[in-house]
Image: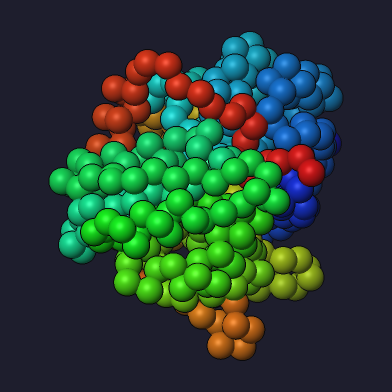
């Protein structure tokens, strides 16, 4: 009898193929690992903001015989699911953009987190700006990004390295009200070394179009959050007039064997590849490893400290936190001469990854006080 694996399917207006990408990555990674006798069961979870709905869908998948369930959810939601999977002797693989802080770094029983490490990438961007001579920085970000912890990590990386945020600019919620005028005015009137930016999806498109039209960054260095480097939207976004540095955990141009094999497999199946199909692929790799044991305790023992090679490079599941430690790459957003829009060029692995990861952990431990937050998974939005 074939085993059953569950997959929670999120919805997003700005990433409409997200569910298909996650499914494609999961399915074909399992096949590539030699696992062909697995049935994948699915349940929809909307924009992954309703914890009660997600709990119910997980419960349904477990009752339907799924011993392993993967889902793209907010870290707070993953924490809420812990007792369910513990009580059911099942495994939850939390897929995450990495833009929120978990409540605790203590490993959650029966939960493994595969993250794109958004806040780590942001912290590295802030620290790199100072290392490259940019100490006085303006910040600009979307109303949406303001509800996640990436902007806190950008500021912490900058300030911890001796820099300072001299100006904050958050764009309006409605696209019809989008303007970069406050930022433009500040850059004209004040001595500023550069700009830290946090945008995603169509908000990134608006940001780049506005910057291009006004030649806004002609005399400034710009450092972006990792979703500023998302290739799906970069290909649709006007070149902003200057090259922008960002830090990402995956780019299609990474020249490693696992990434080449991943892209080849997806192309064979006539499927696109992007950050979400990479997350699905890694969920498949983790699932394949866990299926090597029958008992949940043995599965957890297999996964704790597991090292595997993914399209991102070598990834390690930290036994102490149950989170993944993956490489972070410095990359440049440049003009695509073929289209006039943008292209992402990965350059090298960041030498700051290990140091900044430990400092990020301290930020998470010390994070306290009132703070607002969106409850959905990063990038999951309604129309």
Coordinates of residue 299 in the picture (x, y in percent)? 54, 31
Q: Is residue 28 above or below residue 92?
A: below
Marker count (numbered)? 0
Q: Residue furthest bottom?
A: 338
Q: Residue furthest left?
A: 162
- Closest to the observer: 251 or 286? 251
Would you identify the image quadrant in which residue 70 lies? top right
Coordinates of residue 120 in the picture (x, y in percent)? 37, 45
Quadrant holding the C terminus: top right
Figure colour scheme: rainbow
Coordinates of residue 109 in the picture (x, y in percent)? 50, 20
Quadrant holding the N terminus: top right
Which residue is painted at 66% across and 69% down in the image?
236
Which residue is painted at 42% across and 74% down in the image?
242
Q: Is residue 329 above or below residue 146?
A: below
Q: Could you tell whether 18 is left or right of 110 in the image?
A: right
Which residue is painted at 40% across and 57% down in the image?
185
Query: From this viewpoint, is residue 374 visible?
Result: yes
Coordinates of residue 82 in the picture (x, y in percent)? 57, 18
- Closest to the observer: 61 or 238? 238
- Closest to the observer: 75 or 127? 127
Which residue is painted at 44% across and 30% down in the image?
101
Q: Could you tell whether 257 is left or right of 165 in the image?
A: right
Q: Could you tell whether 26 is left or right of 169 in the image?
A: right
Would you identify the image quadrant in which residue 235 lies? bottom right
Query: From this viewpoint, is residue 114 visible?
Result: no
Q: Is residue 54 above or below residue 211?
A: above
- Closest to the observer: 102 or 220? 220
């Amino acid at each position: 009898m074939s085993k059953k694996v569950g997959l929670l399917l999120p919805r997003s207006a700005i990433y409409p193929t997200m569910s298909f990408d996650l499914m494609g990555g999961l399915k074909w990674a399992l096949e590539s690992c030699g696992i062909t006798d697995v049935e994948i069961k699915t349940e929809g979870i909307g924009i992954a903001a309703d914890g009660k709905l997600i709990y119910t869908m997980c419960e349904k998948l477990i009752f339907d015989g799924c011993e392993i369930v993967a889902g793209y959810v907010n870290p707070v939601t993953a924490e809420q699911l812990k007792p369910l999977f513990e009580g059911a002797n099942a495994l939850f693989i939390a897929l995450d953009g990495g833009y929120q802080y978990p409540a605790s770094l203590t490993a959650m029983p029966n939960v493994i987190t595969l993250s794109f490490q958004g806040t780590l990438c942001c912290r590295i961007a802030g620290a790199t700006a100072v290392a490259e001579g940019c100490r006085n920085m303006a910040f600009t970000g979307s109303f949406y990004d303001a509800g996640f912890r990436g902007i806190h990590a950008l500021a912490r990386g900058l300030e911890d390295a001796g820099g300072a945020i001299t100006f904050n600019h958050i764009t309006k919620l409605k696209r019809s009200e989008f303007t970069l005028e406050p930022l433009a005015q500040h850059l004209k009137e004040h001595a500023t070394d550069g700009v830290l930016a946090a945008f995603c999806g169509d908000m990134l498109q608006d940001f780049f179009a506005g910057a291009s039209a006004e030649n806004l960054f002609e005399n400034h260095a710009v450092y972006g959050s990792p979703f500023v480097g998302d290739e799906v939207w970069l290909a649709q976004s006007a070149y902003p007039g200057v090259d922008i540095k960002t830090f990402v955990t995956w780019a299609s141009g990474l020249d490693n064997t696992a990434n080449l094999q991943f892209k080849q497999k997806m192309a064979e199946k006539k499927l696109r590849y992007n950050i979400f199909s990479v997350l699905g692929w890694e969920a498949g790799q983790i699932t394949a490893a866990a299926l090597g044991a029958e008992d949940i305790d043995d599965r957890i023992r297999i996964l704790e400290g597991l090292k595997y090679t993914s399209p991102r490079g070598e990834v390690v599941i930290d036994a102490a936190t149950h989170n993944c430690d993956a490489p972070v790459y410095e990359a440049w957003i440049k003009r695509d001469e073929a289209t006039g829009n943008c292209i992402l060029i990965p350059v090298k692995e960041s030498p700051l990854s290990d140091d900044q990861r430990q400092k990020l952990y301290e930020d998470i431990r010390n994070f306290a006080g009132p703070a607002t937050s969106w409850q959905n998974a990063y990038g999951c939005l309604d129309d």
